Amino acid sequence: MSNVDVLLGEKRTFYPSKEIVENSNVKQWMDAHDIPDIENLYQRSKDIEWFWGEVEKDLLTWYSPYDKVLDRSDAPFYHWFTKGKYNIVHDALDRHIGTPTEHKVAYIFESEQGNVTELTYRDVYNEVNRLANGLKRLGVGKGDRVALYMPMIPALPIAMLACARIGAVHSVVFSGFSSRALHDRIQDSGAKVLITADAFWRKGKVINLKVLADEAVKDSGIEHTICYQWAQYDVPMRKRDIWWHDLVADQPHECETEIMDSEDPLFILYTSGTTGKPKGVVHVHTYSVGLALTLKWVFDLKPGDVWWCSADIGWITGHSYIVYGPLMLGVTSVLYEGAPAHPEPNRLWEMIARHGITVFYTSPTSIRMHMRFGDEWAKKDDMSSLRLLGTVGEPINPEAWMWYYENIGKSRCPIMDTWWQTETGCFVISPLPIMSLKPGSATRPLPGFNAEVHDPEGRFVVNKGGSLVLTSPWPSMLRTLYNESERYAQHYWNKNGDFLTGDIARVDSDGYFWVQGRGDDVLNVSGHRIGNSEIESALVSHSSVSEAAVIGRPDDIKGESIAAFVVLRMGVESGDELRNTLRNHVGEEIGKIARPDIIYFVNDLPKTRSGKIMRRVVRSALISQEVGDISTLANPEAVKEIENVVKHNNYYS
Ligand code: WTA
């Protein structure tokens, strides 16, 4: 985001209408608690034990009560709602049975080809129970890990809920990841069952998921693969493979919900860190309270709403805001299988009109892509059903914010720019619909959350960029990294007990936060987190590569694009063919989203005297910034070479 752009955003303020304020869920809660205004709400909620104890009463149902809201004795391994007995599926499904919600539509599902199916809460409940019974038959029980590699179809939330119901821990791997990435995650989590589908559609093409899954299962600990028949694609079935429909054929529609401790794990979700090895973020059943609260307060969901979060369930946004959050609130959600601009650029807008969506949540990348298609594509459809909009995943530049506000929300719908992470489980810095908005700012930490921006000495700073830290724990926080509790404690927490987000941000004089992006070596491409070193490891695993440095470069649409500088082994010929080979190799190692947009071949990379590649220096040379002090480099001439290749060959794919 350029400085001019930020200034533009900072100068404009948008105030909520009286109608929105008066009808909002958060205002109702404030009235019920004698809280006169929002400043008072922020103040009162600084007592996080009081706050979370109070809000959970409206949101969670317990098998038996907890004794303490928060136990800090084992910090940074915080324990919430200790000794409570709970299961998130009870809140997401069971408690709706026997109420009017039972026959309400939980998911309006639309396939890429345009077929629409509706599933009521009862339908979801029945299917979850049948699969849960089937999983039990295969010997899956409490604490066992189940890997899910599935398209965006109703079977995915059903599979997640079936695992959670019997106390198994699901680990969803985004269907755009490669066999190799899936294999590594299966091995790390120790999953013994994999659930996948035959194939699915993406941009009109069939993706053979089962074939990729078979490759991943080789030499892994998987004992059974359950395959959901979706695209009617002919796939080879091996001895360990079972069709989903065969597994559930004789299973009853009832299955007892496993009574869990509030701190029992619900899922593992792998996310990129600064090393080549992804981190297995562990969330527990009671992470639910954060989702239900934020969805109810920020997006103000009420029983009549039709909610659409356009993220993929393979990422945290889908876990929290397509699966668990909306089901807990008993609302109707849209689930869409396919690509956002297929077959025409107005697919999203046309779906908003056709399904009467009232609240829509998407990413800045998607907004920027639609801006580029031209305003006329956003004028074709009647989107008057909308009342609130949202974004997530990356900073939204004020220009894109304004476009979204004017063209999609017709200057009526406030935009909730929600900042959060896989680790936080739910929104942390986000507006409430009753607040004034500044385009490009995620506003302030929500009630119950505390954040600050620190300088390198750990001092709180205002109006200056610094590290974004969270200064108190919150109930939907990750509890640990799977099998790496030491890494969890060391990586995320400083000695003052602050949680390190890895982001750079600035707080303005009104206390509004402006998140600028990652401060560590993690890329954010179209809102997807990918570690620089993950891509570098993939590149050097190719026989022709000896060294690689991967850099994020500002991109008008995707936020960041991926540039790779590659040193080849002696005797290897460089050229476009090798560029393609290497791009495809990264695609196979990680997934298509990690393929470099541009590859430069160089003879050397700038290194310290101890041999560490200086990405900072490579980045400055790439984006023609002042490289700064290079006196500590062992090979300063490498910088010149980079500047030269960047200037002379712009190899875009
Ligand atoms: C970035 C996605 C600016 C940030 C929910 C964070 C954002 C990373 C925003 C987490 C936002 C997310 N404004 N940046 N509203 N939301 N980010 O784990 O850098 O996939 O650290 O979680 O996305 O990505 P993750």
Image (cartoon, rainbow, N blue to C red):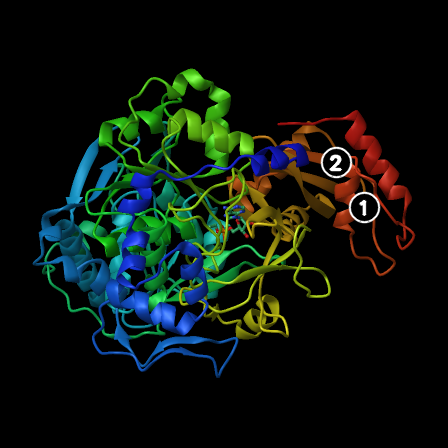
Instruction: Decide: few, some or many residues near mark 2? Use Cα within 10 Å; few <14, some 14-19, many ≥20.
Output: some
Q: How many marks?
A: 2
Residue at point 43%, 64% (across, down) = 448
Asked if residue 157 lies left or right of residue 563, the reply is left
Against 627, residue 147 (above or below) is: below
Which of 178 and 439 lies nearest the eye of the viewer?
439
Residue 216 image point, x, y percent:
44, 53
Q: Which mark is residue 605?
A: 1
Residue at point 18%, 50% (across, down) = 245
Which of 576 and 168 lies nearest the eye of the viewer?
168
Residue 649 image point, x, y percent:
76, 26
- Asked if marks 1 and 2 touch (Cβ < 8 Å), the reply is no
Instruction: Decide: few, some or many residues near mark 1? Use Cα within 10 Å; few <14, some 14-19, many ≥20.
Output: many
Which of 60 and 244 lies nearest the eye of the viewer?
60
Q: Can the viewer see residue 445 in this picture? A: yes
Residue type for callout 2 = Ile
Residue at point 50%, 48% (across, down) = 443
Q: Can the viewer see residue 190 in this picture? A: no
Asked if residue 158 lies left or right of residue 580, the reply is left
Q: Which type of secondary structure does the marked residue at label 2 adopt?
A: loop
Most extreme residue toward the front is 36
3D distance between C-alphas at marks 1 and 2? 16 Å
Residue type for callout 1 = Leu
Residue behind mark 2: 623
